[in-house]
Image (cartoon, grey):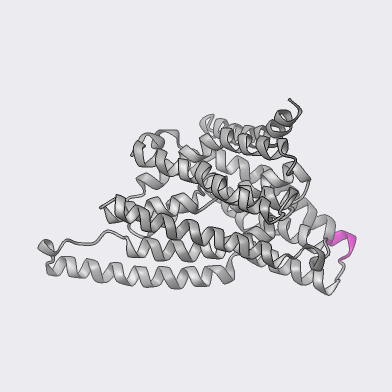
């Protein structure tokens, strides 16, 4: 019972804040432009400052773990490659393959991941190292997958009109790849992590005024991010393409953690490291998947359905995984 209470205390408050955000949106206390601005503010300001604060205040050399970062990277790479190969053989509709693959591996690591770890340990823990190992790969892989699987004109209809459309699509793919590569180096969260590392390594100490100012913004990160996620929740979309949605959700929430958590345990990853790996593997599909799919000319229905389904179902599955790890005394 103690382990179950621990698990519920770790997950239920996170999802309750999201539910409150959803209720506030439906009560018209916030509208779509406000939610969009809130999410942008969180992503660009509060989350980077939270990660910066946690890393800058720690001993970098005692925290850094190369094997851990590589583990996160290669686990993610395996999830991407294996899903793409298998899905391409099962689904004949190319654009569906792209959406399925992206939604099956791309976790809400920065937002929900930090929220869960902070809720359990009081700080971001190993989330920054996990983010370094996964987020750049998330973005590059998504652009490649969605580019190669984007809808195209059929040969029978290949008129001048369609040639113009294909040329436009090719140009947009190239632009998306360039934008993704640039986005890795300009990603506010990555910048926050790297800046925190630089401060930690150099031993720079800031005046109390600066530390308190940063702390005020960092404190806002988790609650505001969860409210924004809840406010952007669209339940009706989960009914679209229900079969591939459920399959993709099963892979995202259950299959990957079942495969890789035992491996992580065998490599002696424990406590914060193991929780961060769990978040990497089993947290809901990030909302940015839908935005990227739409921007790269995909339908987006399957992606939005998986985002909604995994967000809803993860309240149960994440509680289960935390309960299991706590019962095994791994966290």
Question: Position of 69 compared to 83: left or right?
Answer: right
In front of the other: 88 or 130: 88
Residue drawn at the location 44% of the way across and 50% of the way down: 103
Query: How many discs mark residues in the rendered view?
Result: 0
Q: Does the stretch in magenta take in 209?
A: yes
Q: Which segment did they paint magenta? A: 206-210
How far across and how far down the image is residue 287, in percent?
A: 49, 48
Residue in front for this viewpoint, 181 or 83: 83
Residue 93, position in %: x, y? 26, 52
Q: Which quadrant of the figure contains the N terminus? A: top right
Question: Can residue 240 be seen by looking at this rendering?
Answer: no
Residue at (38, 52) in percent of width and height: 99
| Residue at the spot 40% in from the left edge and 33% down from the top edge | 236
Magenta region includes residue 114: no
- Dominant secondary-structure state across the stretch colored magenta: helix
Q: Residue furthest front?
A: 266
**Above or below 148: residue 264:** above
Where is 151 relative to 303, above or below? below
Q: Residue at x 77, y 50 (%)?
A: 123
Percent position (x, y) of residue 212? 84, 55
């Amino acid at each position: 019972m103690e382990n179950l209470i621990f698990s519920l205390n770790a997950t239920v408050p996170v999802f309750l804040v999201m539910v409150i955000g959803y209720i506030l949106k439906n009560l018209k206390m916030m509208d779509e432009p406000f939610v969009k601005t809130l999410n942008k503010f969180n992503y660009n300001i509060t989350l980077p400052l939270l990660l910066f604060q946690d890393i800058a205040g720690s001993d970098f050399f005692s925290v850094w773990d190369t094997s851990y970062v590589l583990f996160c990277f290669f686990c993610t790479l395996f999830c991407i490659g294996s899903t793409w190969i298998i899905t391409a053989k099962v689904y004949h509709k190319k654009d569906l393959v792209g959406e399925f693959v992206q939604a099956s591996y791309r976790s809400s690591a920065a937002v929900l991941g930090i929220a869960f770890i902070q809720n359990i340990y009081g700080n971001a823990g190993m989330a920054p190292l996990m983010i370094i190992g996964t987020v750049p790969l998330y973005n590059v892989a998504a652009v490649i997958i969605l580019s190669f699987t984007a809808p195209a004109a059929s040969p029978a209809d290949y008129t001048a009109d369609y040639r113009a459309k294909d040329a436009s699509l090719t140009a947009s793919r190239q632009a998306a790849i360039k934008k993704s590569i640039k986005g890795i180096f300009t990603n506010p969260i990555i910048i926050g992590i790297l800046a925190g590392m630089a401060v930690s390594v150099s031993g720079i100490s800031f005046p109390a005024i600066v530390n308190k100012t940063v702390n005020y913004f960092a404190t806002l990160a988790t609650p505001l991010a969860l409210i924004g996620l809840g406010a952007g929740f669209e339940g009706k979309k989960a009914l679209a393409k229900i079969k591939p949605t459920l399959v993709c959700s099963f892979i995202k929430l259950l299959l990957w953690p079942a495969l890789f958590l035992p491996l992580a345990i065998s490599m002696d990853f424990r406590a914060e490291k193991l929780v961060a790996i769990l978040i990497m593997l089993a947290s809901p599909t990030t909302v940015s998947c839908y935005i990227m799919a739409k921007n790269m000319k995909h339908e987006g229905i399957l992606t939005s359905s998986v985002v909604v389904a995994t967000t809803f179902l993860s309240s149960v599955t994440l509680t289960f995984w935390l309960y299991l790890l706590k019962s095994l005394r791994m966290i």
